[in-house]
Amino acid sequence: MKDGIFSADASGSNAEAAQHFNAAVRALNIYRGDPVALVDQAVEIAPEYAMAHILKAYLFGLATEPEAASEARSILSTARNFAKTDIETSHVSALEALLANNWTEAAVRLDRHSMDFPHDILGLQAGHLMDFYRANARNLRDRIARVLPQWSADQPGYAVLLGMYAFGLEEAGDYARAEEIGREAVEREPLDCWAHHAVAHVLEMQGRAEDGIEWMASREPHWTGDDNFFKVHNWWHNALYHLDLGQSDKVIELYDTRVRGEESQVALDLVDASALLWRLHLDDHDVGDRWSGVAESWRNHADGKLYPFNDWHAAMAYLGAGRTEEVDRILNQYRSAPESRDETARWAKATGLPLIEGFRAFWEGRYGDAVEKLHRARFVVNSFGGSHAQRDIIDWTLTEAAVRSGNRGVAEALSNERLAVKPHSPVNARFLKRANAIEPQLVAAE
């Protein structure tokens, strides 16, 4: 391997297979094309090509879908047989932890991996995604910061690293540097939709909705192609800007034509669909029967075992579709699961359980209960899943519950909190206006 490119002398490889493998890595780097088909070509040419099996195990193992995880375990057993070099066995070790549902252990193993192999862009990207899935803002930033000085601007993949670094900076709250580096990354690699989305996150977090709409429109040809795996998520970001501006008709149009236009069955896309419908519901918009299709699609993914972040978003759709028995199924799975060393099982009980209970209380109109559940849950929710922008749905639901509960003190406090972070947000301004309109509650003297 040199400069992020794997050579033909890797275990079981040859020149032709390595060419297909590197094309697959490139497709993963910019989330375009079909990396699975490309790596399958490498395996067909060189059946004992260890890194090809390793890449495919990552592609399935990082999908957060039960069937994909099962397939990844099978692929890993093959990779284990062929891995011989230090870089290969190091990847196998990280995958073993990941597929045992111990995301942090896998991410830490890739921390060390990247210290030993700083130019292995597959290891860096797999670790970056693990940091994202476990909501570790610091390591999203620092994993890339540790290796960037060993890269130069003329090396293949350098722009991709900048895009990952920009997202890490954004999640760590360094918005100015994140925007600067994200814009540099897309200037160097216009097709990198992860870098594009890093800038979109900055604009969302700063409440710059108009700038966000302009940013998405100015680069639309680069992130909306049919072969772009990340296009639904970027459309979701576009919809959030319009929602913040109160343009609900536009949001519903984007939902129907872009977010759910192709009725994707991919878990990542279903997360966006559930989250957008829930936000529309919070903003008091009737979404009709849109919940039903999303709820049906979640059946293959929300098993109450693999990834609680997905279960929580599935529960939103189940509540919207009136499928409370499915919500009960997930909650019962969490409550009855034995004590486990499995990290995701701990996430489920510590965070997934109060989140789903709180969202259920909100849906059922038990707003005081929702406030109690969600106020506590939001302080531990950064232990798993997604970005700050995705997790904002918790605070949005909490604040809406406080307003609807009629508790002026709590509603004003939470509205002020939101406005302090995004002072130009029309949604937040409406929260405070509604909170101020609540009749003060009289406190009886003792």
Image (tube, rainbow, N blue to C red):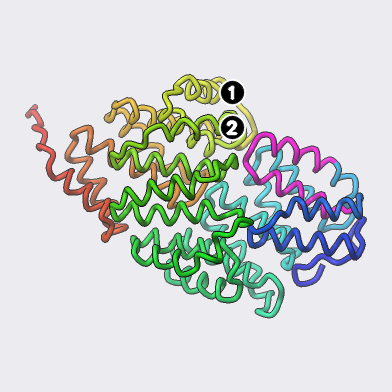
The disc at residue 8 is none
Left or right of 91: which side holds 105?
A: left
Q: Which residue is mark 2?
A: 345
Residue beneath the point at 62% across and 34% down: 306
The disc at residue 337 is 1
* Helix, strand or loop at mark 2: helix
Evaluate whether residue 141 shows in this view.
no
Q: Amino acid type of disc 2?
A: Ala
Give x and y (percent) for residue 283. Answer: 29, 42
Q: Quadrant of residue 307?
A: top right
- The residue nearer to you, when weighing 230 against 121, is 230
Give x and y (percent) for residue 382. Answer: 47, 46
- The residue nearer to you, when weighing 438 against 137, is 438
Residue beneath the point at 43% across and 27% down: 321
> Chief secondary structure of the magenta span?
helix
Task: Identify the image quadrant of the C terminus.
Answer: top left
Evaluate whether residue 286 shows in this view.
yes
Give x and y (percent) for residue 351. Answer: 48, 36
Q: What stretch of residues is rendered in magenta?
A: 49-77
Q: Quadrant of residue 159?
A: bottom right
Q: Residues within 10 Å of mark 1 (few under 14, many from 20)?
A: some
- The residue nearer to you, when weighing 442 against 406, is 406
Residue 1 shown in magenta: no
* Helix, strand or loop at mark 1: loop
Residue beneath the point at 30% across and 34% down: 371
| Upstream in sequence: badge 2 or badge 1 | 1
The reply to whether callout 2 and callout 1 are in contact (CB within 8 Å) is yes
Q: Quadrant of residue 396?
A: top left
Q: Amino acid type of disc 1?
A: Ala
Task: Identify the image quadrant of the N terminus.
Answer: bottom right
